[in-house]
Every structure is written in structure tokens, then in C-alpha cells.
Image: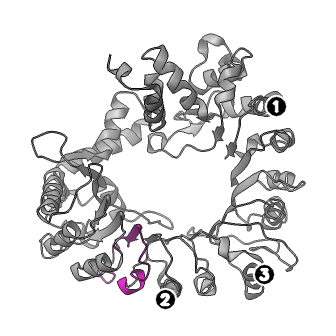
Amino acid sequence: MMRDAVSLDVWHLIFEQCTTQDLSHLCLVDKIFNSIATPVLYRSITLVAYKIPSRSGRSSRSTEAKTEPELLTGHWRLLSRLEDAKHHTLRTWIQEIDISSFNNSSFSSARADEDFLERLQSNDCLATLIARLPNLRRITIGFPSIQSTTLIRTICEHKRKPELLLLNQDSQEKIASLAEQTLPPVTTLSASVNPANDRSGPNRQIPTLQRLFFKCPHLRSFSLTVMRQYGGCVPMMSRYPVIWSFQLTGEETFPPLEHLSFDGYLMDDQQWRYWRDGLQWDRLVSLAIGPQSCAGLFRRLVGFTRSQKILEVPVWQGEGDDEREELVELLSSFDSLETLVLKGYMCPVEVISRHSNLSTLCLHEEESACKARPRQVLTAEELNQLDVNCPKLKSLQVGVKRENNQWPDDVFDKLATCFHNLRRLSMHFELGLPDIHNPIKPLINYASVRSIGQNYFDRRKQAGIEVFESFTLTVWTGKYFRRFPQWPPQYAGFEKKFSATYEISLPSDSSGEVQVRHLENERLDLIKSKKIKIHSYERSQLAKQVAAAVEGPKVEDFSG
């Protein structure tokens, strides 16, 4: 048997690289594979059940029925096994529990099963389970509703001292409860607050979050989104004074942050001085700002990001013009970045090229429906400059533009013959939103994408550049980072219908033809095979999108 030709240690290494689904299948092969795969499978578990909401939006509340052994499936069954006294060995394998929103397109319309979350809360179920996991190292909680005093105390008193990641903290009551004690286990904290919501009286979300922030002495990652009014016909008028930012005094001891993210967070000069003097900037590895404006922050950060490795700056389409110069000033003030993600901003290549150690770069400007705001993309000359100054690039995402009914062959050639260390390239095409009555040509469709991919890989080999087997070329079109204040404009339907993502890779056989995957079509196949479930309306829209990708936009398709 081939399995016997490979040592168990090698199989262990192989299984370490497998997905959860692969491990589940391997457990069924035989006893030996089961004994190797099961500990790896249970090392990190998600403990959230999902369901597709009914058309009425109401879900079953029959928690009692779920506890019947013959009805236990999925995460209900997993929880039952973990609670069973005879499965002690299984519990010793668990090192990480994730109880947060499942970020996967397969569950785009799914919602967390409220019955399951209530089950975790009932009789301190989750706290009892955690106390019985002797090797637990990390706990991620993204549903504030399941947080309780008993749960937090159990985590704090656990002998293994697991780290705690608190995500999606949006409940003032829960935040206040957490802030009543010092929380050494908390290493990650993310919160989303709406300081202007005063329906229940004066809003104290920001001050309460501030107390929690400074109650976490070992906090390494902090993310704060401040929801500000956008769109709508009737402005919201606050009845009480609104507190938009932390109210620091300068006496606070900041935790040793390594990752910081601000979205819509504004601070005045005085508050900035306290952040400036209190934060250990030399420890900060990554910074994310946006997509809502954090006015003035780019310029204030100049001189304080000299050792930073990661910078992510998304901005909603058409909303970042006032801060572009400040961002350029910030990027020009240091040269240590290894990852730079700009969504909505295009900065001069001369500035980006300062960061010669870049391995990941995303430069994307959303397409505008206004002819007076043409989308900026890199020219062939700029790509060449980028290649010369940033030779370590492994992942590159750029926009590509068709003009005069012609492919940008000079840009294609530079992308194929430069960037020798590249493992992944993504090219985004515009749809022609300023005039949806006359779609841009040449069209983006199955045939043209295959041709683009084949020519790219052929040209790269002709140039004598090694093409890694795992190299993936992504060609896609449609919206990336856009929002509408009220009713979507007419072009929104057109854009949604013709959004498509294709992944092209090297041939797997001797035919020499590249492999093309249409991701939307693959998702539709999963739905048809009932491996994932979505609403019938979403399915019909996806079917139209897949059908539209065969030939691409036509003149008669302008209505969306």
C-alpha cells in the first residue's frame, strides 16, 4: 500500500497542510489515517451554527428539540461530543476555539443560529466547556451576547492562560461589564460604535470602550469603527452632547499595540498628543485607516511609522480626494513597508517605490460613472519602474484599462516579463459605467479571459522567467469599494450583473492549455448540488450573473 511507503512523521507533516474538509475525509479512510488526522482536525474548531433565514425573517426557537440525540447535526453534534464525559482525549486536542462570524462567501445569506448561541449561554455551557479544555491557547468571541461574567472569569482563571480575542463589540452594556475588571487574556479588541444613537438616553459607548481599552494591559490589536451618518433623507439630530473620541488625560498607560485600525475615528490636536506620546510606536507593525475618513490622521502620523511593515488604506469611491496629498506625504516619510494595500487611492509610483521591500501591493481605484473622473491605472513605464525598485514583489493587484477598443498589450507585456518573484497577479478591468449603453470592447468573457491567461503564461516562459506551479492569475471586473447613499443608480444593476472573477492557472496536463475557473459559476454549482444554501432570489441573480459572463455585456443589456 502506498501509505506504508511513507513514514507516519511525513504523513503528520502532510496532514498539517490539509483543509478542514480534507481532514474530515481522511478520518474516514482507515484507523491509521483517523489517528493522525483527528488531532489535527480538532486542534482548531469553530463553534458557531448557521442557518438560512426564512422568507419571513423568522427562525425556529426550538432549542429543546435540538437536544434530541437523533436530531443532532453539525455544530450541535460537535458541542454534544465535547460535553460528553467519555471524550476527554478529544478535549485535550483542542487548542483554539473560534466563536465569531464566519467570513465566507458560501454563507453570504446565512445567519448565526440564535438557538445555538442561546445553548452556549444556558447554564454557563461555554464557560463549563472551556474549563474542561486543558490545552486551550486561544479563544475568539465575536458575539457579545454570549459574554458573561462567569465566562470571562473562567478564561482569566484557566491554567493554560489562553489569549482572548474580543470581536464586534457593539453593546454598551457588555462593554461596561467587561471593563469592570482587569483583563490580562485580551490580546485583540475590535469595536463598532454609533455615538450619535441616543434613543435610550446619553450615549456613553466611547468612554465605556475607553475604559475597556485600558483594562487590557496585554492588548496587541485594536480596531475601532465609529459609524457616522451617511446618506438618508432626514438628518439625525442628537438630543445630548455626542462624544466622538476618547477623552484622554495623559496619565493613561497604553497597551503594547502591534496592530491598529481606525475607521471614521476623529481626534483633535490635544487627543492626538496623548496618542502620540502614549503609544509605543516602535512596536506598531500594521496600521489600517478607513474606509471612512479619519481627517488629519495621515499627516499626524508622519515621523511615527518608521518601522511599520503593513499599511492598509481603503476609501469609498470618490470620497478620498481631500486626503490624498496627506497620504502621499505619509508614504514619503518612511520606507519600511512590506505590504501596502490602497483601495480607492492611486499614489505616484515614485512614492510607492521607496518601499523596496514590498512583497504585497494592491493599487486599486474604483471605476466612476462620471466621465470627468477617469480611473487611474499604472502605465507600462510605471510598471517597469515598480519592477526595478521593488524586486521582492510576490503578490500584485492592479487596474487595467482598455482604450480605443484595444487591449493594453504594452501593459500585458510588462506584467508578463517583469516581477520575477511574483506568485499571484490580479488585473481588474472597468465595465464602462459612464456609458452602459455602449459596453467597452474588447469584451471580458470566458473566451477573452482564457486568451489573456494563455498569452500571459506563454510570454512569461518565453522571457525565461520561472513560473511557479501555484501561480494564480486573476482577471476580474465589477465593483470593489463603492457605496450608495440612498437609492442605487441605474448602472448599479448593470455592474452587479457583469461582475465576474476568473482565476487562471498553469495547465495540469500535457495539453498546454491554461485552466480557467469562474468563481461565480463554481458557487452556483455548489448551490445546485445543495452543498450551500441561499435565498431563491439570490440564486436567480447569481444565475443571471453566470449566464452574462459567457459573452460579456451587450448593447441591449444596459438596463441591468
Residue 325 disc label: 2
Q: Earlier in the sequence, mark 2 or mark 3?
A: 3
User: Is the residue 251 above or below the residue 412 in the image?
Assistant: below
* Residue 365, magenta (yes or no): yes
Where residue 398 sits, quadrant-wise, is bottom left
Callouts 2 and 3 close, C-beta under 8 Å: no
| Point 46% across, 63% down: residue | 487
* Callout 3 amino acid: Tyr
Residue 170 shows up from this direction: no
Residue 229: x, y in percent? Answer: 63, 70
Residue 377: x, y in percent? Answer: 30, 76
* Callout 2 amino acid: Glu
Callouts 1 and 2 close, C-beta under 8 Å: no
Residue stretch rendered in magenta on the structure: 349-375
Residue 400: x, y in percent? Answer: 26, 70
Q: Secondary structure at mark 3?
A: helix
Depth-wise, is mark 1 or mark 3 nearer the camera?
Answer: 3
Q: Which residue is mark 1?
A: 124
Q: Which residue is mark 3?
A: 274
* Callout 1 amino acid: Asp
Tell me the quadrant of the picture where the N terminus can be found.
Answer: top left
Q: Is residue 46 left or right of residue 419?
A: right
Q: Secondary structure at mark 2?
A: helix
Q: Is residue 194 left or right of residue 46?
A: right
Depth-wise, is mark 2 or mark 3 nearer the camera?
Answer: 3
Q: Is residue 160 left or right of residue 332?
A: right
Q: Nearer the viewer, residue 360 or 223?
A: 360
Q: Secondary structure at mark 1?
A: helix
Callouts 1 and 3 close, C-beta under 8 Å: no
Q: Is residue 65 left or right of residue 311?
A: right
Q: Earlier in the sequence, mark 1 or mark 3?
A: 1
